[in-house]
Amino acid sequence: MDKRGFLKFSGVGLASASLLAASAKASAQSTSDDAFYTDNKLTDITGSVKPVTAKERQARINKAQSLMAEHDMAAIIIEPGAAMDYFTGIQWWRSERLTAVVIPREGDIAVVTPFFEAPSVKETLQVGQDIRVWQEHESPFEQVKQILKDRKVTKGNIGFEQSVRYFVLNGLMPLLPDMKNVSAEPVTLGCRMYKSAHELRLMHKANEITLQAYDHVYKNLEAGMSQGDVKGLMQSAQQKLGGSGIWTMALFNEASAYPHGTRQEQVLREGSVVLMDCGCSVHGYQSDISRTFVFGEASKKQRKVWQLVRDGQQRVFEQAQPGNTAGSVDERVRQFYNEQGYGPGYQLPGLSHRTGHGIGMEGHERVNFVKGEKQKLAPGMCFSNEPGIYIPGEFGVRLEDCLYITDKGPQWFTRPPQSLDKPIGELASLSTE
């Protein structure tokens, strides 16, 4: 899935004939060739972490109910996705048939789902016993109305999680004439934006997997590989190490100047820039790491731009202090790049995207390191730190490591590399004090 050694070739000129031969060899090794993409030295490293428990989910519901009281909401509605999993453990998908969770301000939660889906939904449900089913000829919204009535919720504000679809709101609200729909974000963000020590451990493990996989890929690159070859190598490595929900991106040469790539086919050759953006999940929690290498001998310009990106990443880290706004983090690195002749603003050559995004159960969560964001940083928040510099027609560089905020300041999940000659970095110790 897209999103997002060298040394032994350093200083060696590759003749055209050898490059073509290597290319033919790489092309012959398809992404389905398990012998090419697996390494028996890579083993599952996730045994030291455990999934989120029912007790933790109940505590999350309790916090949500406290926030509902604080923000004057009588109940909230959630559809399948990360928020539903976060509160209940239900791992389900969305279709035209409504499955939803109702969390009232007081009382037990309830689930609404089609009759024939109920046994499957129950398989992952960890909290709550009240499951209301509806038949194909019935309206699921009548079931939601009855749940609310049973909990004496007939008036006031009802919150809808931000990703709930319009047909749900449009189908339910006419049945609740004395209620007003509002955003549930003060409740859902108020819970999910601040990670617990257990959540941080799961994210730390996911980042450990991705970083180890990068090390494996870096040591196994060969001239002539396609972008697909390298993605396959990364996919296999993360899977062998215990990651799930894996996604990979590999951009070579001029394609690296486009943050999410192009359709142009690229082949690894001497002097190629390799920009990778990859991640995985451990018990539902995400990693997101980007690395930029040069295959063989790097040019002076490649080295200069790589170091500027790394210096910018450090400025992001230094600015990400509790009490600072998320927007100020983006402003800090963008000002630095502008001083170096890149930009201004989002202009190219320069940094054409936000500096980072929230991360947790989803790869991209609120809040972002982006211009104008007024949310103040606080302990428990987690972000990607991913400034880049992109030069159309030449190459791009992005380095991305995730961080979390503590009362003592920002902490890395993975420490960024310090030089282009040692471009992997290292796993940081987890600080949950």
Image (cartoon, helix red, strand yellow):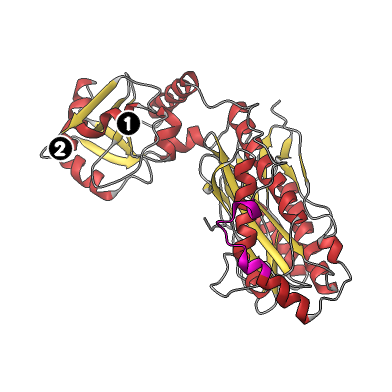
Residue 51 located within the stretch drawn in magenta? no
Mark 1, residues whose alpha carbon is within 10 Å: few (<14), some, or many (≥20)?
Answer: some
The residue range painted magenta reads 25-37
Q: Which is more toward the observer, 163 or 345?
A: 163
Magenta region's main secondary structure? helix
How far across and how far down the image is residue 343, in percent?
Answer: 67, 72
Q: Nearer the viewer, mark 2 or mark 1?
A: 1
Q: What amino acid does circle 1 point to?
A: Val
Q: Quadrant of residue 271?
A: bottom right
CA–CA distance in space, label 2 to label 1: 26 Å
The disc placed on residue 175 is 2
How far across and how far down the image is residue 421, in percent?
Answer: 85, 59
Q: Quadrant of residue 226?
A: bottom right
Label 2's element?
helix
Give the mark, 2 or 1, whose residue is nearer the N terminus: 1
How far across and how far down the image is residue 387, in percent?
Answer: 68, 59
Question: Going by the picture, which residue comes out furthest to the right?
Answer: 11
Q: Which is more toward the observer, 283 or 385?
A: 283
Residue 33 located within the stretch drawn in magenta? yes
Q: What amino acid does circle 2 point to?
A: Leu
Label 1's element?
helix
The residue labelled by disc 1 is 121
Q: Which residue sits at x=25%, y=44%?
A: 169
Q: Which residue sits at x=58%, y=31%?
A: 199
Quadrant of the image for the C terminus?
top right
